[in-house]
Amino acid sequence: MDYFVYVMLPYITVIVLVVGLIWRIRIWRAKPRAKAVLFPAAGSNLAATGRVAGDIILFGKTFSVSKTLWAMSIIFHLGLLLVVFGHLRTVTEFGFLWSWFNLDAEGIDRVGYAMGMIAGGLMLSGAILLLARRFTPNMRVLSIFQDYFVLGMLLIIILLGFAMRLWMPIHVDEIQHYARGVLTFQAAVEVNNILFLWHFFVAQMLIMYLPFSKLIHVVTKPVAESWTIR
C-alpha cells in the first residue's frame, strides 16, 4: 500500500488529471456558441474576461441567486485557497515572506500551524454547511449521489488533515524531501505516518475524479463562459 500510494499513484494521478482536463475542455470548446448573447453583453474580450474572473473570484451569480449559498461558498473557497497556498510549502519555502515578517524557524512553524488550522477550520465549516444544505427538502430532491460523494471525500481529507496535525504531525522538511523526490522522478517511501498515507491517498483519488465531477467548474467555467459571453 505504501509503495503504491507514495511511488506509483502520484504519476497515475497527474496522467489521469491532465488527460481528463484535456478531454473535458475539448468537449466544452466543441459546443457551438449561442446565437443569442447574454445580457448585458460584454463589449470586448477584455470585458468578457473581467466578468468571468469577477464571477469566479466573488461568486457574483451565486450572490444574486442565494446569499446564504454565497456565504457558504465564500467560507469554503477561502479555506481552500489558504490550504492550497499552505500546501505549496511541500515543494518550496516562502523565504521572502518569512524574511519580511522577520520569522525564525520556530516562528515559521508556529505561523504555519496556526494558518493551517484556520484554513482547515474554514474549509471544514464550509463543507459541513454545504453538505447540510443538501439535506434540506428543496435541495434533497435535486441532489444526486455525486453531490454527496464529493463532499464526503472532502470531509474525509479535511478530517484526516486535522487528525494528522493534532496527533501525528509531520515536519514540513520530511514532506518537502519526499515531494522533491516525486518531482525528480525519484519517488520513494519516506513518510512513515498512517494518517498522512490515507490523507494523501484520498486526496489523489479526488484529484483524479475532478475532471469527471462537478468540481471541474474551476476549469470549465472560464472556458465555457469566455466562449459564450460576447
Image: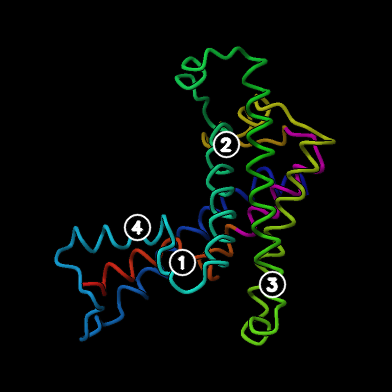
For disc 2, the neighbor class at 10 Å (few under 14, some 14 to 19, many from 20) is some
State which quadrant residue 150 falls in: bottom right
**What's the mark number on residue 86?**
2
Q: CA distance from mark 4 to mark 2?
A: 24 Å
Identity of the residue drawn at 63% across and 34% down: 115
Q: Are marks 3 and 1 in contact (CB under 8 Å)?
A: no
Q: CA distance from mark 4 to mark 3?
A: 28 Å
**What's the mark number on residue 54?**
4
The kind of secondary structure element at disc 2 is: helix
Among the two numbered marks 4 and 2 on one chain, the one whose residue lies closer to the N terminus: 4
Among the two numbered marks 1 and 2 on one chain, the one whose residue lies closer to the N terminus: 1
Residue 180 location, x and y as percent? 56, 31
Q: Which residues are magenta?
A: 191-206
Identify residue for label 1: 63
Please, which residue is most extreme toward the right here?
Answer: 167
Which residue occupies the foreground of this view, 213 or 163? 163
Identity of the residue drawn at 71% across and 26% down: 171
- Residue type, mark 4 in image: Gly
Which residue occupies the foreground of this view, 180 or 196? 196
Among the two numbered marks 3 and 1 on one chain, the one whose residue lies closer to the N terminus: 1
Identify residue for label 3: 148
Identity of the residue drawn at 53% across and 36% down: 88
- Closer mark to the observer between disc 3 and disc 1: 1
The kind of secondary structure element at disc 4 is: helix
Q: CA distance from mark 3 to mark 1?
A: 23 Å
Q: CA distance from mark 1 to mark 2?
A: 28 Å
- Residue type, mark 3 in image: Tyr
User: Is 112 left or right of 20, judged from the image as shown?
Assistant: right
27 is higher (above) or lower (below) than 91: below
